[in-house]
Image (tube, rainbow, N blue to C red):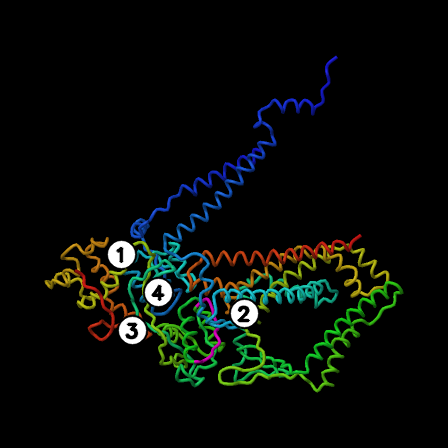
Amino acid sequence: MAVVTSDRGRRQAAATQANFLYRPEVRQAIYQVVLVVLLLALFYALVHNTAANLRKQNIASGFDFVARTAGFDVSQSLIDFNSSMTYGRAFLVGLLNTLLVAGLGIVVATVLGFVIGIARLSTNWLIARLATVYVEVIRNVPLLLQLFFWYFAVLKALPPPRQSLTLPGGGLLNVRGLYVPAPIFEPGFEIVAATILLGIVAAAAVYAWARRRQNLTGQQFPVLWTSLGLIVGMPLLTHLMLGSPMTFEYPELKGFNFQGGMVLQPEFLALLLGLSIYTASFIAEIVRAGIQGVSKGQKEAALAIGLTQGQSLRLVVIPQAMRIIIPPLTSQFLNLTKNSSLAVAIGYPDLVSVWSGTVLNQTGQAVEVILVTMCVFLAISLVTSAFMNWFNRRMALVER
Amino acid sequence: MPYLSKLVAAAAVGVIALGGSASAQTKTLDTVKQRGSLSCGVNTGLAGFSQPDDKGAWTGLDVDYCKAIAAAVFGDPSKVKYVPTTAKERFTALQSGEVDVLIRNTTWTIARDSSLGLIFAGVNYYDGQGFMVKKSIGVKSAKELNGATVCVQTGTTTELNLADYFKANNMTYKPVVFEKLDETVQAYLAGRCDVYTTDQSGLYSIRVQQPKPDDHLVLPEIISKEPLGPSVRQGDDQWLTIVKWVHYALINAEEAGVTQANVAEMQNSTNPDIKRLLGKDGELGKGIGVSNDFVVNIVKAVGNYGEVFERNVGSGSRLKIDRGLNKLWSKGGIQYAPPLR
C-alpha cells in the first residue's frame, strides 16, 4: 500500500529542502523591496538634479523668499493686506480669495444646476425647451470666453461712477462694482444678536419637536413660518424696541471712487457668475441623469398614495436619485475649484494670479511657487472629495 | 509576477538614465549656430517695440535688435524665430532655454540680475514709468490721484513702483491687476479704472493705437527709472559679450556716421576708426566669436542706433517719441558705448 501524504505535507517537505530564493513569497518580497528602493532613488535623483541645475544657473532656491516684503497691493482681500507685508501673507490673501469664489460658486452652481435639471424634465413644453437651450449653449462654449463675455461685455455696458444706477435699498451699480450699504453696529446691538441666536436655537427645537410629533401622530406643523418668525420676527421686534441700534452707512461719491458701504467688485461678480453658470449646465445634466435613473414605478407609487408632483419629487425621487448624482457632482465641484484659476484673465486676485503670477515673477523661483500651488489645489480637492464621499455614504444608508 | 519584474527593470533603467545624464555646460553660441536660427523672446504686441503686422512679420525696436544679433552671428537678419512672451512667463522662458536672448522692454534691476539667474547686456532704451488718464476726468498731475483705481500688469516693476509712489506721497489707490497687456488696456478703456500705468514708451504706444488718441492724457510725472535692455542667462560669458557688443556696435556706428545707406561706400573709407569698426583692420569680430565684418552686417540689416530708434519709435513712426535720454552722449543724451579697438 502506498503512503498517502497530503499536499500540504509534500509542499512543506519540499519547502524546507528548497533554496530560500525559490520560494514564491520570498521572491515577491524581494521584488517589491527593490521596486520601492528604485522608486525612491528615482525621486531623489529628480530632486537632486533639479537643485543642481538651479544652483548651476544661479537661480535662487529655497523658501526664504516667503518672509520678504511683497511690495505690491491687491485690489480685494478678505484679510488686511498692503505692500509692506510679506509674500507669505500675499499667499494667504490669494488662497482665501480662491476659497471664497470656489465655495460660493459651488453653492450657486448646485442650486442653479438642480433647478435647471428638474426644469428640463418638466411637462411644461416652454420651460423644458428653455432649459435644454441653456444647457446646450453654455456647455459648448469655452469657459474663458464666457468669463470674457461676463467681464468685458457686461462691464462695458455699466455706467461710470458719476452716473451710477441706483438700486432699491440704497445700493449703487456702476462699472466699478456693486455698492451696498454697510451695517454699522452700535452698542445696543448685542441684545439683538443674542435674540437672533436664541431664535435659531428655538427654531431647531421646534423642528425636532414637530418631526417627533409627526412620526407619532401624523399631524403636520407649520415649521417654516414658525422658524421665520423666531429667527427674523423676534429680533426685528427687539431691534425696534431698543431704538434701532443698527444703522447703515451709505456709499457716497468722493473724488474718484465711492467711500463707505461695502463693494462687490466686478471681477468677483463676473468670475462667480461665469463659473456658476458654466458648472450649473453640467450639474443640470447630472441631476437629470439621476432623476431618470430612479425607476418610474417609484414616482407612480408616490402619486398613487396621494403625494403631489412636487412632494413626490422632493420626498421620494430625489433622495434615491442622490446616489447616482453625488459621484459626478464631486467631479464638477473639483472642476469648478480648478477653473477658478482662470481668474487671472479678468483681474481677480485669486491664488494663481497673486502667488503663481505676481510672486513667481517678482522672485523668479518658479519651481517652489508652482510646487506649492499644486499642493494647495491637491489639498483642496482631496478635502472636497473626502467630504463628498462621506456624504455619499450617508445617503447610501437611507435605502433598506 | 512577470509583470512585477518588468516594472522593476523599467524603474532601474529610469534611475540609470537620470543618474547618468551629466549636466554639461552648453554654450549658447554653439546651440544657436547648430540650430541655424536665433530664438528671440519678444513682447506679444507692443507698438514700436515688438509687434506683428497683419501679414505676421514682426517689427519694432526690440525686433531690430534680434535681427542685429542674427546678422552678427549668421550674416542674415532673417534667421530669427520670434517667441512672444507675456510679462509673467518671460523670465521662465529665458531660464529654461526656450529663448536664447530676451529683448522684451524689460527693466534692468538688481533682483533680476541676481536671483533670476539672468544678466543684462546693456540698455537699449532709457525709460521711466508714467501714468495715462482720460482727459474727461480733469486731472493734470499725478499728485491729484488720491483714491484712484489703477490698471496694471502683473509681475512687473510697474506694480512695485506704483505701490511705492503712492505710499511715499501718502495717497491711497486701488490696483486692478491683469496678466495680459490687451486685457489691462481694455479694462482701462472700459472705465474700470481711472488710470493706466506702465513705462512712458508703452503709454505713447498704447495711446497712438486708440481710435481717438487725443482723449487720453499722459501725465507729466516720471516716477521711476526704467532702463530697458536685452538679457541672457548667467554663466555664458561668450554669449553675453556678443549681445553686449551688438548693442555697442549700433551706437558706435551712429557716432561714426555709418548709416544703412552709406555702409557700402564707407567700407572703402581711409579713416582708421571706421576701418576698425567695419572690420577692414584687426581681428575684433573673431575675438568675440563672430565674423570680422559683423558691424557691416548689422548696419546693412537694421541701420545704426539712431536709425533703429527713429524708424520704430521716433519721428519716422506713429509714436513720435522724442529721443530725450536716448540721444548719444555727445548730443546731450546718455547712450555711450566703449570703443571698438
Whole-percent x and y of residue B220?
35, 81
**Quadrant of the image occupied by residue A112:** bottom right
To the question of a shared chain for discs 1 and 3, the answer is yes
Whole-percent x and y of residue B285?
20, 55
Residue A149, disc: 2
Q: Secondary structure at mark 3?
A: loop
Q: Residues within 10 Å of mark 1 (few under 14, many from 20)?
A: some
- Residue that lies at the very extreme toward the right in this rendered image: A217
Look at the picture and state if A95 lies above or below B224: above
Q: Secondary structure at mark 2?
A: helix
Whole-percent x and y of residue A97?
56, 67
Q: Which residue is mark 4?
A: B110
Disc 2 sits on a residue from what chain?
Answer: A
Q: Measuring 89% from the left and 65% from the top, which residue is drawn there?
A: A217
Q: Measuring 60% from the left and 23% from the top, which residue is drawn there?
A: A18
Mark 3: which amino acid? Answer: Gly
Disc 4 sits on a residue from what chain?
Answer: B
Alpha-carbon distance for marks 1 and 3? 25 Å
Q: Is residue B21 magenta?
A: no
**Quadrant of the image occupied by residue A22:** top right
Q: Which residue is mark 3?
A: B314
Q: Which-is-in-front pick, marks 4 and 3?
A: 4
Mark 1: which amino acid? Answer: Asp
Q: Residues within 10 Å of mark 3 (few under 14, many from 20)?
A: some
To the question of a shared chain for discs 2 and 1, the answer is no
Mark 4: which amino acid? Answer: Ile
- Residue that lies at the very extreme toward the top in this rendered image: A1
